[in-house]
Image (cartoon, rainbow, N blue to C red):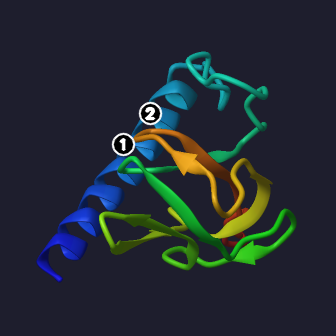
Amino acid sequence: QAQQQAASAKQNALDEECLARLAAKAAAGGGPKREEEEGPAAIEGGVDVCSAIAANVWEVFAKVGDEVEQGQKLFALEAMKMEVAVTAPVAGRVAAVRVEAGTLAQMGDVLAVVVPQAVPQPAA
């Protein structure tokens, strides 16, 4: 269970790194697109949900169009007989699911993209 907690902490750190990278680019005027992303073009305003470890994708709980809450379980990965949950880094709508159950995800692979919910602005 300590290994599962360590893997979960590592996923949280990776999620925070993805969010920090996105915020830094937005602050620099670079917008939400990530040039280093391989494969399909970046989704406008999307936040990558990344794999913290190399593992088999055991279950996929998210579908394109699903509304998810921050921390909601999107995927179950399996490595060395341990299940590792991958959760939504932000609340929003699932814009892309890039893996299927039974496939292998490498560390850092983008598993899905979530477009954050708009935060209501207080009336002035």
Nearer to the camera, 32 or 34: 34
Amino acid on which disc 2 is placed: Arg
Residue 38 numbered tag: none
- For marks 1 and 2, give the CA distance: 6 Å
Residue 6 sits in quarter:
bottom left
Q: Compared with residue 11, is residue 41 higher up or lower down, i.e. above or below?
A: above
Residue that carries the numbered disc 1 in the rendered image: 17
Q: What kind of element bears circle 1?
A: helix
Q: What is the residue that sits farthest to the bottom in this orientation? A: 1
Figure check: 91 above or below 110: below
Q: Judge by depth and name the residue closer to the eye, 53 or 79.
A: 79
Q: Quadrant of the N terminus?
A: bottom left
Q: Are marks 1 and 2 in contact (CB under 8 Å)?
A: yes
Rendered location of residue 100, percent (x, y):
72, 57
Q: Amino acid at mark 1?
A: Glu
Q: Position of residue 33 (x, y in %)?
A: 67, 26
Q: Position of residue 55 (x, y in %)?
A: 43, 54
Q: Please name the residue that numbered disc 2 is placed on.
A: 21
Number of other residues with Cα within 10 Å of mark 1, as a class: few under 14, some 14 to 19, many 20 or more: few
46 on left or right of 40: left
For the view shown, which residue lies furthest in the left direction? 2
Residue 77 is situated, as x and y percent measured from the top left of the image, at 47, 65
Q: Residue at x 45, y 42 (%)?
A: 18
Q: Residue at coordinates 46% horizontally, 46% vertically from top-left?
A: 19
Front position in the image: 51 or 71? 51
11 over 108 or under it: above or below: below
Q: Residues within 10 Å of mark 2 (few under 14, many from 20)?
A: some
Q: Kindly state the secondary structure of the residue where label 2 is placed.
A: helix
Q: Is residue 116 visible?
A: yes
Asked whether, in this view, residue 27 is left or right of residue 119, the answer is left
Q: Is residue 52 depicted above or below 57 in this figure?
A: above
